[in-house]
Image (spheres, rainbow, N blue to C red):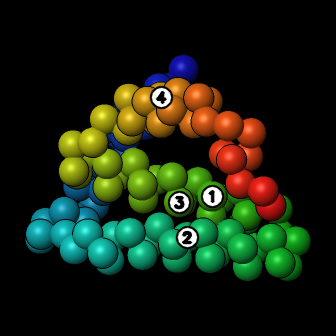
Amino acid sequence: MSTIKELTRLCHKIAKEKGFWDEKRNLGEMLMLVVTELSEAMESYRIQDKKNFNEEIADSFIRLFDLCGGLKIDIEKEIRKKMFKNKARPYKHGKIC
Ligand SMILES: [Mg+2]
């Protein structure tokens, strides 16, 4: 079974092997490439292509894990920390609607 930490390490390793880290990366561009994958997921959903929808969601995570690997972010720790913080928030995070 893979942990998020292992997936992060592997996604970044593969991206490096494929040359995506040969030059300095542009953080804004990397973030927008995640948005691009989510847009592709939205389009797949719109045309009811469930198989491609799943793949585009996977692409989104792969890009995020690669980014986290490159920036040396322990995203598993950060997710757990934020989930714990969210759990302590009020119902619907205190919003009326
Ligand atoms: Mg894609």
Instruction: Name the residue located 38 percent from the left edge and 69 percent from the top edge.
Output: 31
**Which label was assigned to residue 60?**
3
Dot 4: element = helix
Mark 3 close to ligand 1, CB under 8 Å? yes
Do the residues under discs 4 and 3 have CB atoms within 8 angstroms?
no
Please state if 75 lies on the left or on the right of 62 as rendered: left
Do the residues under discs 2 and 1 have CB atoms within 8 angstroms?
yes
Mark 4 close to ligand 1, CB under 8 Å? no
Q: Earlier in the sequence, mark 4 or mark 2?
A: 2
Instruction: Name the residue located 68 percent from the left edge and 47 percent from the top edge.
Output: 94
**Which label was assigned to residue 80?**
4
Please state if 87 lies on the left or on the right of 42 as rendered: left
Instruction: Name the residue located 47 percent from the left edge and 67 percent from the top edge.
Output: 34
Mark 2 → mark 3, Cα distance in angstroms: 5 Å
Please state if 45 lies on the left or on the right of 83 as rendered: right
Mark 1 close to ligand 1, CB under 8 Å? no
Quadrant location of the N terminus in the rendered image? top right
Q: Position of residue 69 (x, y in %)?
A: 28, 45
Residue pointed to by mark 2: 37
**Which label was assigned to residue 57?**
1
